[in-house]
Amino acid sequence: MAKKKPTVKKDEEIDKNTHILSAGYVLRQNITETLETNYMPYAMSVILSRAIPEIDGFKPSHRKLLYTMYKMGLLTGARTKSANIVGQTMKLNPHGDAAIYDTMVRLSRGYEALLHPFVDSKGNFGKAYSRDMQWAAPRYTEAKLAPICAELFADIDKDTVDFVDNYDNTVKEPSLLPVRFPTVLANPTTGIAVGMASSICPFNLKELCDTTIALIKDSQADISDTLRAPDFPGGAQLIYDGETMRNIYETGRGSFKMRATYHYDKDNRCIDITEIPPTTTAEAIIDKIIEKFKSGAVKEISDVRDETDKSGLKITIDLKKGADPDKLMQKLYKQTPLEDSFSCNFNVLIGGSPRVLGVRELLEEWIAFRTECVRRRVYFELSKAKDKLHLLEGLQKILLDIDKAIKIIRNTEEESDVVPNLMIGFGIDDIQANYVAEIKLRHLNREYILKRTQDIEQLMKDIEDMENILANKSKIKKIIIGELNDVSEKYGQPRKTSIVFASDIAANDEEDTIEDFPVNIFFSKEGYFKKITPQALRTSGEQKLKDGDSMLIEREATNNTDLLFFTDSCQVYKAKAADFDLGKASQLGDFVASKLGMENGENAVYMASTLDYSGYMLFFFENGKAAKVDMSSYSTKTNRKKLIKAYSDKSPIAGIMQIKEDCDLVMESTAGRLLLFNTGAISPKTTKDTQGVAVMTLKKGHRVKAVRDYKPGEFAKPYRYKPKNLPAAGALLSAEDTGEQLSLI
C-alpha cells in the first residue's frame, strides 16, 4: 500500500507553530485551555464520583458495594465469601477487585475503623490501628450486612430515591441511599480529591439523633447542649476546648487534639496503652518511642513492645526502677504521636456541588433530604393504595350480581369482547374490568369477593391519612423524629471517647513544677481560705476573720494537697493548695468563690483535703437521709477543675463531713432529738449524687439541723441515743445531759 503524503499546512498555519526536525509541527496552546479540556474533567470526576461523600454519608464506592450486598440478600441471609461480593460489585463499580475489597475492609466490623460498621465480617480484616497487620485475601474471608444496614435501605423500593443506570447501562443503582439517620456524621469519612479534601469526624449516634430531633423541633436550638463532642471507635481521650469545638460546629473546619489512654500496672511496673488517637498506628508510636530513647530524650524506659492480641490493642512500656509513670506519659505525649491532632473539613456534595458546612447546616441539609424521602415514600404508598381501592371498588360492583358477570362472560363470543362487555354491564372502567376478568372461576363466589372488599373502608381511611401527611409538614417531621428515636434506641451505645478539658491538661502538665512543703490550711464558714507555713503560724497571733465569720476547718497538709470545695449548688471545685498564695493569720485570706471562678451566687460551704483520695465524704440532708461516698469518686486523671452533681440535690444539705475511717456522729433535729450512730452502718457508694439512706426518722414539719462528731463521755448514758437499727427517731436530752451542745454544720 502506498504511503500517504504528509498534509502540507498553509503558510499562515506554519507561522503559528514551531517546526521541530523529525517531529513535525508542535501546536502551541494556552495553559488555561489545556487545563479546561484535559485536567478539569479528571478533577471533576474525582470530586463528584470518587473522593467526596454525599448527604447520605457515602462515597460512590461505598454505596455501590452496600447496594450490591443488599441485592444479594445479605441483610438477613448467611455470610458469603468476600470474593463473591467483590465479583458481584464489579457490575456497578468497574475499578478492579482490589479497590472494591479495600472498601469492604474499611467498612467492616473486624477492621474497627467505624463507630457503626456496615459489614459484619468473619476472618482477618486487619486493624485500623495497625500499619503492618494486613487483611487476608477475599477468598479466605466472609461477610454480610450488619443489622444497622436495615436503616440504610428501608423503603428503597418505594421510590424514596432516584435510580440511575450503571456504567454500561445494564442495571439500575440508587443515586443516594434513603438513610433513616445522619450517617454522614455517624462514622468517620476521609477523602482526598483534586484541589480539595474531606475529613469528617464521627459523633455518638444517640447524641446525634437527639441533636437532629432538637433541630427538627427548633431550628435555633443550641446543638452544643446535646452534641457534646466527637466520638471515635478507638476510644482515647479528646482534649476539649469550647471555643475550638464551637468553631468546628459553626464552620465545619478546625482541629482538636486526641490523647492515648493508659493504665499503670504496679505489680509489673509497666504502662499499658490500650487506646490511641485515630490518626496514628501502634507501630508509628513504638518507632517514635524507640527513637526518643536512642536519642536520650527519654531515659525512664527499659523496654517497649506491641502486645496486641485478639482482646484488642495493647502497647506495653516497661519502666526503670524509680520512674514516675505519670511524668513519663506527660513527656511522651509531647514527643510522640500518643497525642495527635485531628483536622476537620466537613466537605460534602450537596446537589452535585462540594460545600463545606458546619454541623448545624449539615444536619439541616440531611433533614431536608430525609423529608423528601419520606414525602416520596408516602406518595408512592398513596398511589398504590388508590390503585388497590380502584380495583376493589370494581370488584365490589360484581357483588350486585355475580350471575350476571358469569352470564356476560359465557355469552361473549370473542375473547377480546369480554372486557368491553363487563365495562358496559357493570359501569366499570377498563382496569377494573380486566381485574375482574382475570379472577379464577373458583373465586367467583360471594365469600371470596366479600373478603377482598372488606378492606375498602380501611383503605379509604389510610388514603385520607396519607393525604393529610403530604399536606402537613409537621406530620412528616413527626415521622422523622419517630424514626430517629427508633434508631437511637436500637443502635445507640455509650461514648467510647472520653472528654478531658484543655485547661485541666495544662494544669496537669504544670504539676511537675509544684514545690512541696508542709502548710496549715484554714477554711471559714463564709468561704475564706488561708494557707500558712508552720513557722509563720507559730509566730502569729489570733486568726483574723470577717465580722460574724468563724473558722470551720483547720488542717495540716502539704503544698501539693488536693482541695475539694463543695458548694451550695451541689458542685465541687478542685484545686491544689499550691494554687493559693502563702498568707498570714492577720490576713482575711482568699475568697474561694472568686478565686476559683464560681458561678454567680454560688458559695463554698465545705472543704475537703486529700493526697490519695482515701476515706469517705458524708452528706447529711434535712430529710433525715445520709450519703456515704468514696473519696475515690472525686479523683480524676486529668485534674478537672469542676465536677457537677457532687452530691444529691433532692433535699437541702444539713451537713458535710470528710472522714478517713468510720466513726461515731451525733445528728440533731429541729425537734430537739439527738441520734448517736456509727457511720459504718451506712453503705458506701461510688455514685456522687446518690440520695443516700434514711438515718433519722422525722415528724412532719421537722428537719435535721446539725451533725457533729461524738465526744466520748459527753452523754451520761450513750445507749439512750444509740438505737440498734437505723433509721431511728433519736431521743430528747435527758436531765443528766442538759447543757450546751457544740454543733458543727
Image (cartoon, rainbow, N blue to C red):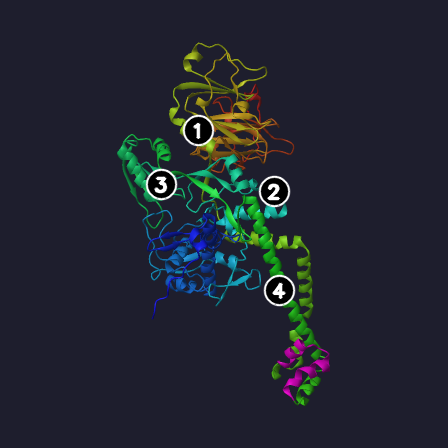
Majority secondary structure in the magenta region: helix
- 2 or 1: mark nearer the eye: 2
Upstream in sequence: badge 4 or badge 3: 3
Q: Position of residue 241 (x, y in %)?
A: 49, 35
Residue indicated by mark 4: 381
First in sequence: mark 3 vs mark 2: 2
Judged by depth in the image, the label closer to the viewer, 4 or 3, is: 4
Is 246 one of the magenta-colored residues?
Answer: no
**Quadrant of the snapshot with the N terminus:** bottom left
Q: Secondary structure at mark 1?
A: helix
- Which residue matches tag 2? 221
Above or below: residue 227 compared with residue 701:
below
Q: In the displayed structure, would residue 596 be above or below residue 11?
A: above
Q: Which residue is mark 3?
A: 273
- Asked whether 100 or 677 is in front, the reply is 100
Q: Are marks 2 and 1 in contact (CB under 8 Å)?
A: no
Alpha-carbon distance for marks 2 and 1?
33 Å
Question: Counting other residues with Cα less than 10 Å from the Cα at mark 3, is it few (<14), some (14-19), or many (20 or more)?
Answer: many
Q: Secondary structure at mark 3?
A: strand
- Give left or right: position of 61 versus 314: right
Q: Quadrant of the C terminus?
A: top right
Q: Position of residue 439 (x, y in %)?
A: 62, 80
Q: Which mark is residue 507?
A: 1
What residue type is disc 1 on? Ala
Q: Looking at the picture, does residue 645 appear above or below residue 8?
A: above
Which amino acid type is marked by label 4? Glu
Q: CA distance from mark 1 to mark 4?
A: 60 Å
